[in-house]
Amino acid sequence: MKTTLLFLSLFFCVISTSFSQSISSSPYSIYGLGTLYDADLGTIPSIGGSGIALPSTQFINNLNPASLAFMYHNHFLFDVGGKSIFSTYQNSDKKESRNNIQFSHIAFAFPITSKSAFSATLKPYSSTAYKISNLTLPILNSVENYNLSVTGTGGLNNFDLSYGYLVSKKLALGLTTSLLFGNATDNRSYTIANAVSYINKKTNYNGVRATLGAQFQADSTLTIGIIAKTPTRINASKIQTVASTNSSSTITLESDLASNVDDFYMPLEAGIGFSKAFKNKLNVTLDYERGFWQSTKQSDIYGSFVDRDKISLGFTYKRPKLFGSYFNRIQYAAGLNYDTGYLEVDSHRVINKSFSVGVSLPIDNTFSALNISYSYGQKAKISDGLIKENYHKISINLCLDGIWFVKRKFE
């Protein structure tokens, strides 16, 4: 118990620090709702983001609500995490580096009956953090140019309420209701000669989305999982201020003017996953997901939305003994991820490729564990005329397992 408290104190110090830091930054967060977050619960970051077919037995699997139905009776799971990302951005002319520490998630789950369980998860859904300084652009139908500077911050939060039900010994069904909410600011200045125009905009978003899931245990070593995220509309409204200044005066054209803007549409997304165990030591997970973004028939002024394909492959290894030597109880993991993304800029896909490794360090003689993973990834290529993004990510999350409603055997 003392060990658990030590881990808790250290971990919450890291999490509290992360709240004061900048959220993840990427030049590609200027598109749509920003850069989308990956699920970071349990061992998922270590296995390439795969896990649609994994049950929520030793950690909360937020990829598939049906996994909750396989929770052990009387167990309560709590998961909290954070991550640090070091990124470099490079094009044909410049190279820049950034480092961010950020909150990842907080979640808990517990059984309701012997055949059902419930979970709640709060985590970021997307991040908007970009900066463009003194970009020279031509004035339409003129030989003159103007300078553009843009900064953006904000993002959406995701609050999930999930329920899983065991239909039979092998089949489980689940439902997640996701509440999406947040805002993003976009501040722009246009400089022409000695005159500067400012447009400061804050856009508020909110919406609800459902995820349906199922898991089928074909035998003791093979599980198949499927998920489907329903299409939905994210409502949007903005507050905007427009001003212009020159060497002699400043004129405010609009001041905190509220108005509606085009809503954002999220598509149907579907996925299938497999989990296969070999001799109770090695477990292999494989997921494929597809997002039908092109069917939303929406575009961005900087690019267009296209259908997204994502493949995730993961491996975990652990000795079969649950107790005994501490090192015998450590779980090792590795994974690969290939994501075509849903953005196409100048006819080029913003493809994301990454690999990951990690360990799950047990705490006390329970399912409680400290999960640590490292990922290296690359997004886009300079040869395509895009900004190349390389990133190193360290994810840390603490999963605590408690046992409820068990009568004492000794007083």
Image (cartoon, helix red, strand yellow):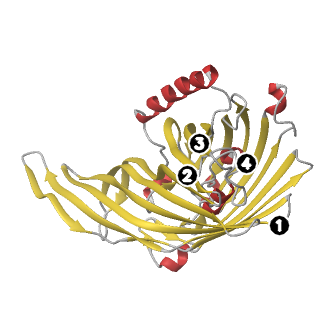
SS of the residue under disc 1: loop
Foreground mark, 3 or 2, reads 3
Dots 3 and 4: beta carbons under 8 Å? Answer: no
Label whose residue precedes the other's in the sequence (4 or 2): 4
**Marks 3 and 2, how far apart at CA:** 55 Å
**Marks 4 and 2, how far apart at CA:** 27 Å
Type of residue at label 1?
Answer: Ala
**Marks 1 and 3, how far apart at CA:** 32 Å
Above or below: residue 389 compared with residue 82: below
Label whose residue precedes the other's in the sequence (3 or 4): 4
Label whose residue precedes the other's in the sequence (1 or 4): 4
Type of residue at label 3?
Answer: Phe
SS of the residue under disc 4: helix
Dots 1 and 4: beta carbons under 8 Å? Answer: no
- The dot on residue 218 is 1
Foreground mark, 4 or 2, reads 4
Q: Nearer the viewer, residue 109 or 201?
A: 109
Q: Nearer the viewer, residue 75 or 253?
A: 75
Residue under label 3, please give it: 405
Seen at 42% across and 35% down, the residue is 19
Type of residue at label 4?
Answer: Ile
Q: Is residue 316 left or right of residue 56?
A: right
Label whose residue precedes the other's in the sequence (1 or 3): 1
Residue under label 2, please give it: 387
Residue under label 4, please give it: 47
Image x and y of residue 166, in percent: 67, 65
**Marks 1 and 2, how far apart at CA:** 45 Å
